[in-house]
Amino acid sequence: MTVREPSAPPAGPAPAAWPRVAAGSWASTGFGAGPAEPPWSYAWDEQRVRRGVRLGRRGDRYDSPLGEAAASHASTREEGDTMTDAREVRDRYTAAFNVHDMDALLRTVSPTGVTVSPEGLSQGHEELASYIGQFWEAFPDVHAVVVESFDAGDVVVDELLMVGTHKGPYMMPDGQVVTPTGRPVSLRCCYICTVENGLIVSLRLYFDQLELRTQLGFPRG
């Protein structure tokens, strides 16, 4: 597997206990919006995906538009390369996420599946639907662009770009709620997904919180 340049380490220590993402919970405050233009972007990464640059240990090609990257991942493998059940499930999750189809997304996840992210921990379909739904509300055009993937039996790992526009309230991992800024976001993320009996039982999401804050207009430091 090709080693890519690492992103910056997460900002601040991990919490002593993961907060729960309560189903249906949400808050709204008058948090200020940042400037209209982002301090930087990852257009270079998006252009690589658009051009069909060869990525991944199997030489996968992603020739489709950004919103269809997951479907392309599933359909453009070399002849004779057998896709693992875990990879197929993970790709269906990503495809459902990209078209904002909650029912299809939940069909890939165990009823007792656990998702851990910088925002907290969600368990079961109700909490996961609340968490994902709030994210879609904050970034209504959000979609995941797979940059690199790795399969290891029942565990699959994806490096991706989460691309969208901040048009709704978003609760930061520290609990602050940011009102819509209209700013574009292209956030590097890593997903580690464990599949059992054809369903996702564990999904761990990592991203640089400082990078997200900066793209939303908060000053560094």
Image (tube, helix red, strand yellow):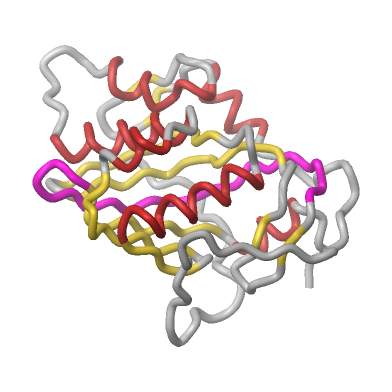
Q: Nearer the viewer, residue 23 or 213?
A: 23
Q: Which residues are magenta?
A: 180-199
Q: Position of residue 215 (x, y in %)?
A: 74, 51
| Displayed quadrant of residue 74 | top left
Question: From the image, which quarter does the C terminus lie in?
Answer: bottom right
Is residue 190 highlighted in magenta? yes
Question: From the image, which quarter does the N terminus lie in?
Answer: top left
Is residue 177 highlighted in magenta? no
| Displayed quadrant of residue 40 | top right
Q: Position of residue 11 (x, y in %)?
A: 61, 72
Instruction: Write the residue at 46% across / 21% down.
Output: 68
Left or right: where 103 falls relative to 10? left
Prevailing secondary structure class for the magenta stretch in the rendered image: strand
Where is 173 relative to 49, above or below? Answer: below
In the picture as drawn, the residue positioned furthest to the bottom comes out as 16
Where is 187 relative to 7, above or below? Answer: above
Left or right: where 214 falls relative to 121? right
Instruction: Write the residue at 40% across / 23% down.
Output: 54
Q: Position of residue 157 (x, y in %)?
A: 31, 47
Q: Position of residue 142 (x, y in %)?
A: 59, 36
Left or right: where 30 falls relative to 133? right
Counting every numbered tag in the picture gives: 0
Instruction: Write the residue at 47% across / 67% down.
Output: 22
In the picture as drawn, the residue positioned furthest to the right comes out as 35
Where is 175 relative to 133, above or below? Answer: below
Instruction: Write the residue at 23% across / 36% down.
Output: 89
